[in-house]
Amino acid sequence: MYLYNTATHHKDEFKPQNPAQVTMYCCGPTVYNYAHIGNLRTYIFEDLLARTLRLQYSLKHVMNITDVGHLVSDSDEGEDKMEVGAAREGKSAWDIAKFYEEKFWQDYDALHCSRPTVISRATQHIQEMINLVKTLEEKGYTYRTSDGIYYDTSKFARYDALVGHAHISGLQGGARVELSDEKRNPTDFALWKFSPKDKKRQMEWDSPWGVGFPGWHIECSAMAMKYLGHTLDIHCGGVDHVTIHHTNEIAQSEAATGQKYVNYWVHGEFLILRSGKMSKSGGTFVTLEVLKEKGYEPLAYRYFCLGAHYRTQLEFSYESMDSAAKSLKNLRALACQAKEQAGAKIEETEKSRTWKEKFMAAMQDDLNAPKALAITWEAVRAGDLSAAEKTDFLQFADTILALDLFKVTQEKPLPIPAQVQALLDQRKAARAAKDWAASDALRAQINQAGYEVKDTPQGQVACKK
């Protein structure tokens, strides 16, 4: 198996430290708001990786829940996102965390993402974070300012290991992060933040340095190493985590242990709108619930994501969602047809095994899901495969694709544009008046708009061609 490793900038053959158990840590959500479909794209790619690995290894998969400590600014300025969410909705930060974590798991399950082995909440691991900061302090990597305990990045020689020297030089020149009066270096970051003196935070804890709360970066290192050891096989996340969050994780983890933190860094690209990156802070985001309200089932979105490689940006549009929903419906129809024709005689043959191997070769080549999906379509249409062989292959493929390929459902129809609905209403009236010429003319207009009309005992039904 080969994975593109952000740290080496090329595809590396995956060689686990211990083939008996692969270790993987994935950065989970900050539960102050709904996850948007861009966030969910990352979890879909991580699920593809987890499912592919599980066919070859035993996998210990850890995901954190950030329910404290993630500030609104990368430069350790501003409020904690949990406190912001609490103020926005007039609830406690604890209630905000509970509500949005539940909503996250609903979306996660609806997309058929397999649950991690360990779910690790930041607020339940404060002592582990304090212990890690104490270790860094004892080794001389920290200093104190008026607002917290900071990590001195100038003391860690490999700080540019993930992003490269040019990026760090840009930061040193003040290109991205302004240097505060007390920070020694622009790249230094907070390990422990002090609570404000003029107000009481909802989430705060005692520590050797004073009452406060952990920095976002220290949380992931402390929890990852608690459950997976000092060196992880794989660490995943979105590309937005590379330059700061994951760079800081490496610095603090390796400084504390003296060992390599992660062997394979795997990052997923953005989902974008035509107007730019999907963003909660900018108010430009779409949730899975919005897609469901518009008539799309969650797995149609999963299918949409499978159509692009996880390392390429993917542009979202409702036209693309229409296409994905239609393709999924057609693939399911062919799968169900094959299974019905096969009956009870479903078994692996040399032919179906060959198709499985082609499918796995695509997934083992840096999770090439678009190719694996194309192979699935080729197999289901292959003239030299029996219905039983097709069913055997599709059952295997769906352990990774997770698209419910054999599910027969009465799906909610996709929304029809207002102008098409108006033509349908006119045609209904024409048919009621037995004006068949007008009815036929309106059908032609509807067809030109890209919709097909069918007359059923329950009335006319229109669907996208």
Image (cartoon, helix red, strand yellow):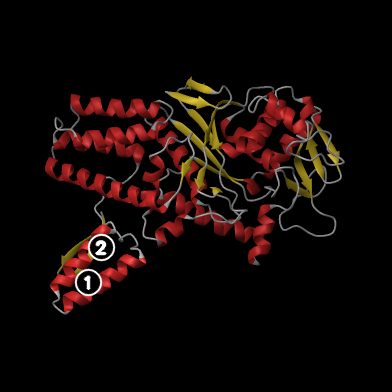
Residue 375 position by quadrant = top left
Q: Residue at x 66, y 33 (%)?
A: 249
The answer to whether residue 293 is visible is: yes
Label 2: which secondary element:
helix
Q: CA distance from mark 2 to mark 1?
A: 10 Å
**Amino acid type, callout 2:** Ile
Residue 465 position by quadrant = bottom left
**Amino acid type, callout 1:** Arg
Location of mark 1 (residue): 427
* Horizontal arrangement in the rendering, residue 361 relative to residue 436 (left or right): right
For disc 2, the neighbor class at 10 Å (few under 14, some 14 to 19, many from 20) is many
The answer to whether residue 410 is visible is: no
Q: Nearer the viewer, residue 425 or 95?
A: 425
On the image, the x and y values in percent for residue 58 come to: 43, 30
Count of numbered tags: 2
Proximity of marks 2 and 1: CB atoms separated by less than 8 Å: yes
* Horizontal arrangement in the rendering, residue 448 relative to residue 80 (left or right): left
User: Which mark, residue 446?
Assistant: 2
In this picture, is 248 found above or below 113?
above
On the image, the x and y values in percent for residue 228 come to: 56, 31
* Horizontal arrangement in the rendering, residue 115 relative to residue 73 (left or right): left
On the image, the x and y values in percent for residue 269 come to: 52, 38
In this picture, is 253 found above or below 112?
above
Query: The N terminus lies in which quarter of the figure?
Result: top left
Q: Residue at x 80, y 50 (%)?
A: 211
Label 1: which secondary element:
helix
Q: Earlier in the sequence, mark 2 or mark 1?
A: 1
